[in-house]
Amino acid sequence: MQFLGELGMAKSGFQFMPETWKDQEMTGIIKVGHKYVDEAKSALILIKKAKGEPASISCEKVSGVIGKLK
């Protein structure tokens, strides 16, 4: 998340919600302030590796209410 930096991460309220992770689909929910949605999506797209393995992260949905995503 170098793209956002520490200050940007703090301002955006960027938070991965581990209780929403689904192993089989490899999906989860990331919570971020509404003013920082585009920046968060950009930062996620720039991720090329996870745990040393090639990775690709995409945004499937955006919602103002977390309950609508579950």
Image: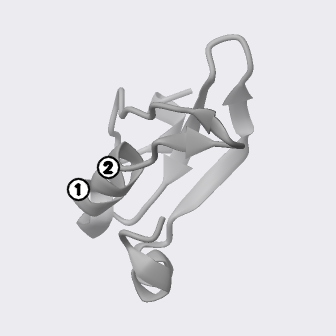
Label 1, label 2: how far apart the Cα atoms are: 5 Å
Residue 25: % across, % down:
62, 13
What kind of colouring is applied to the model shown? one colour
- Residue 53 placed where, x, y %? 64, 34
- Extreme-top residue of the structure: 24
Amino acid at pointer 2: Lys
Q: Secondary structure at mark 2?
A: helix
Q: Relative to residue 48, is residue 36 drawn left or right?
A: left
Seen from the viewer's position, the closer of residues 8 and 29 is 8
Residue drawn at point x = 38 percent, y = 32 percent: 58
Depth check: give the residue in front, 69 or 42: 42
Name the residue located 68 percent from the left edge and 35 percent from the top edge: 20
Considering only vertical position in the picture, is 44 above or below 28? Answer: below
Rendered-image quadrant of the C terminus: top right
- Return the residue at label 2: 41
User: Which label number is shown at residue 23?
Assistant: none
Image spot of residue 7 (x, y percent): 44, 88
Query: Which corner quadrant of the image does residue 4 belong to?
Result: bottom left
Q: Residue at x 35, y 40 (%)?
A: 63
Q: Nearer the viewer, residue 30 or 51?
A: 51
SS class, disc 1: helix
Q: From this viewpoint, which residue is outermost toward the bottom?
A: 7
> Residue 38 shows which numbered tag?
1
Residue 39 drawn above or below residue 8: above
Amino acid type, label 1: Asp
Q: Quadrant of residue 36?
A: bottom left
Query: Is 20 situated left or right of 38 in this image?
Result: right
Question: Does the residue at mark 1 contact the one at mark 2 (Cβ under 8 Å)?
Answer: yes
Residue sitting at x 33%, y 38%: 62
